[in-house]
Amino acid sequence: MAIDRDVLEAVREMDEHELRRLLILATARLERRGVVLDNQSAKVSLRRQLVRCGKPGCNTCPHGPYYYAYWWEEGRRRSRYVGKLDDLDDPLPE
């Protein structure tokens, strides 16, 4: 299946944050299909979280699920907000 030219152009125009988010999503989808990725980069785990907004009187908390990427870098645990990923096939474990 060929990748649509509009999709390729959109990827070319993405900034670093958007490219990292795309990489995380693609990695998660490949792993769900049983593909073993053997790369030299840091192991990134994708976690689904429900988030409380902190607004007084909010009757819909917690919100989400939202996805966060976690990895270790220079001895510290790092994280980055990925966003809502409604198109994942199977729900991730909490």
Image: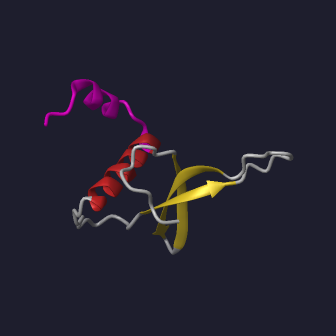
Q: Where does residue 2 sit, x and y in percent of width and height?
A: 14, 34
Name the residue at the top extreme.
6
* Image quarter hosting the N terminus: top left
Q: Would residue 27 be counted in the magenta stretch?
A: no
| Up-down relation of residue 87 to residue 35 (above or below) | above
The residue depicted at 19 percent of the width and 33 percent of the height is 3
Q: Where does residue 94 sit, x and y in percent of width and height?
A: 53, 65
Name the residue at the left extreme.
1
Task: Pick the residue in front: 33 or 13.
Answer: 33
How are the colours assigned in the image?
secondary structure
Name the residue at the bottom extreme.
75
Which span of residues is magenta-colored?
A: 1-16
Is 60 on the left-hand or right-hand side of 37? Answer: right
Task: Pick the residue in front: 3 or 60.
Answer: 60
Task: Pick the residue in front: 3 or 77.
Answer: 3
Q: Quadrant of residue 5?
A: top left
The residue depicted at 79 percent of the width and 50 percent of the height is 54
| Up-down relation of residue 84 to residue 30 (above or below) | above
Q: Where does residue 92 sit, x and y in percent of width and height?
A: 45, 61
| Up-down relation of residue 27 to residue 41 (above or below) | above
The residue depicted at 30 percent of the width and 60 percent of the height is 32
Number of numbered discs on residues: 0
| Up-down relation of residue 37 to residue 84 (above or below) | below
